[in-house]
Amino acid sequence: MTTSMHAAETNPEKVVTPVELQRKRLTTPQRWLSLAELAVGSAIVIGHNVYHLISNEVPILLVLGLLSLRLRGGSWAVTGLRWPSSWRRTVLLALAAAALRILLGALVISPLTAHFWPPAAAPAGSDEIQGHALVALEWLLLIWTFAAFGEEIGYRGYLLTRAAEAGGLSRLAWWGAIFVSAVLFGYGHYYKGPSGMVDSGIAGFILAVTFVLSKRNLWVCILAHGFIDTFAVVTAFFGWQT
């Protein structure tokens, strides 16, 4: 027992193992509930971004995620918001994921989609960033709160997890959940057009894979998302965008 306690102290990430614990306890009704939550969340994403029937999906998904945690008697750790054993490793993983997304988007996705569709549409108001420090700071505040924190909790911490639970938390279920969350993230950027949806879908795929491979450390995704969008603001501010 002393040995196991020592191992837990030296590696805090092993203390919280929601995947293994949930998999043992996951009942058929719980899986159906997760599927229902995924269906509702998907309808909210598409209802807002494609049909504009409801308000922005991010705060709604955040509230649904909090209610789901409350009803299930879980904690923030279930979504991946647990204290990392190493912030240095977390930041490095986030930087690696951000670099992969930026390079892949610039060198592969954008040139490829340009053969089929017009360039991705930029977010409304982003054309005002260039040369305006105050506008850039406002965008950075929005990025690190609404986008990095809000979207990662909604899409990765909530929807991806519910998709995996609906599949029984097997290895195949996690990969299916990665794909589902990536597709939904693409639809979450419907306003960008086909090129932007593909680009955002690939970004969502990279973030989802990072989430799973980092043992569901959501802080990696939050930081990576923030780094990616911060890079976009910096390039817009200095007029480096092509």
Image (cartoon, rainbow, N blue to C red):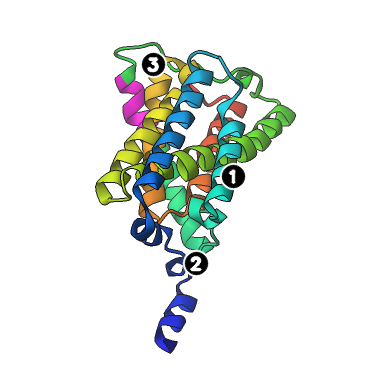
Query: In the image, residue 44 lies at what x, y percent?
Result: 51, 25
Instruction: Compute the Cα span from label 1 to label 3.
Output: 32 Å
Q: In the rendered image, which residue does mark 3 sit on? A: 194
Counting residues from the start of the chain, the first of labels 2 and 3 encountered is 2
Q: Residue lying farthest left?
A: 172
Q: In the rendered image, which residue does mark 2 sit on? A: 85
Tell me the kind of residue under disc 2: Ser
Instruction: Compute the Cα span from label 2 to label 1.
Output: 24 Å
Would you place residue 68 above or below residue 235 in this image?
A: below
Tell me the kind of residue under disc 1: Leu
- Labelled pair 2, 3 in contact (Cβ < 8 Å): no
Query: Circle 1 — which element?
Result: helix
Counting residues from the start of the chain, the first of labels 2 and 1 encountered is 1
Would you place residue 24 above or below residue 141 in this image?
A: below
Q: Residue at x 55, y 42 (%)?
A: 65
Query: Circle 2 — which element?
Result: loop
Counting residues from the start of the chain, the first of labels 1 and 3 encountered is 1
- Labelled pair 1, 3 in contact (Cβ < 8 Å): no
Tell me the kind of residue under disc 3: Pro
